[in-house]
Amino acid sequence: MKKLKQLTLYIPILLLTFTLTSCGEDDETPLEEDVFSGCCSGLTSFGEDVDNLDQSQGEIIADNIFTPNGDGVNDYFPIENIELYNNHEVTIYSIDDEVVFQSTDYGSGFNNLFPVQTQGQFGVDGLADGTYKYKIVVENEETFKKSGLFCLFTNNPSIEQNFAECDPLQPGEFDQILTGL
């Protein structure tokens, strides 16, 4: 009888232990990854930015989202005023730090804009929608270095995505993909 009482005392403890250890995340089920996480954050991606450049010709500004889908609106990664500074380099990286584009003459023609790959309603050849990194250097990294994250978003495949924190559109611009209109 004493053994039965001890057994009834230990059974709930064993059940509780089993329940706690078996209810963890299932290693077989992959977690859904947000390929756009961080792209509108304003964070730098390659250390602190450096700005010892006289930008009186125009401030260098990189937007954090664009929609390269071949519709003629917001199709290239915009870097305002970069063409005003001759000695510059623009490098685009995948989220895994793989170089996917590099130019020392950004903005001087369509072959010097990102992406250079063919664009269409189903996206950009060889580039997935998601977060990418950029680094802009003028003269050298001690004079001007700006880096950050941006979204490449063609809505292929079609997903609902909220880019409210990005504020990507300039006044008067209209991009159906971002507004949903």
Image (cartoon, rainbow, N blue to C red):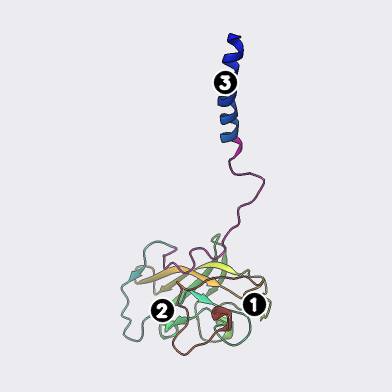
Q: Nearer the viewer, mark 1 or mark 3?
A: 3
Check disc 3 and report the residue beneath it: 10
> Which of the 4 image quadrants contains residue 136?
bottom left
Residue 55 lies, with reference to residue 127, above or below; the image says below
For residue 135, which numbered disc appears in the image? Answer: none
Q: Is residue 55 left or right of residue 137?
A: left
Tag nearer the camera, 2 or 3 = 3
Q: Quadrant of residue 83?
A: bottom left
Q: Secondary structure at mark 3?
A: helix
Asked which quadrant contains residue 54, the reply is bottom left
Which residue is depicted at the point 51% across and 63% down? 37
Count of marks overlaid on the render? 3
**Disc nearer the start of the sequence (2/3):** 3
Q: State the separation of the CA atoms marked 1 and 2.
A: 23 Å
Report x, y in % for residue 39.
49, 67
Hey, what amino acid is under mark 2?
A: Ile
What residue did someone put label 1 on?
117
Q: Which residues are magenta?
A: 22-45
Q: Amino acid at mark 1?
A: Gln
Q: Which residue: 58% across, 84% down?
A: 181
Q: Is residue 169 left or right of residue 33?
A: left
Q: Residues within 10 Å of mark 3 (few under 14, many from 20)?
A: few
Secondary structure that dominates the magenta span: loop
Pointer 2 with pointer 3, Cβ within 8 A: no
Q: Earlier in the sequence, mark 1 or mark 2?
A: 2
Task: Residue at 57% x, 26% y: name it.
Answer: 12
14 and 113: which is toward the camera: 14
For the N terminus, give its image quadrant.
Answer: top right
Q: Which residue is mark 2?
A: 61
Q: CA distance from mark 1 to mark 3?
A: 66 Å
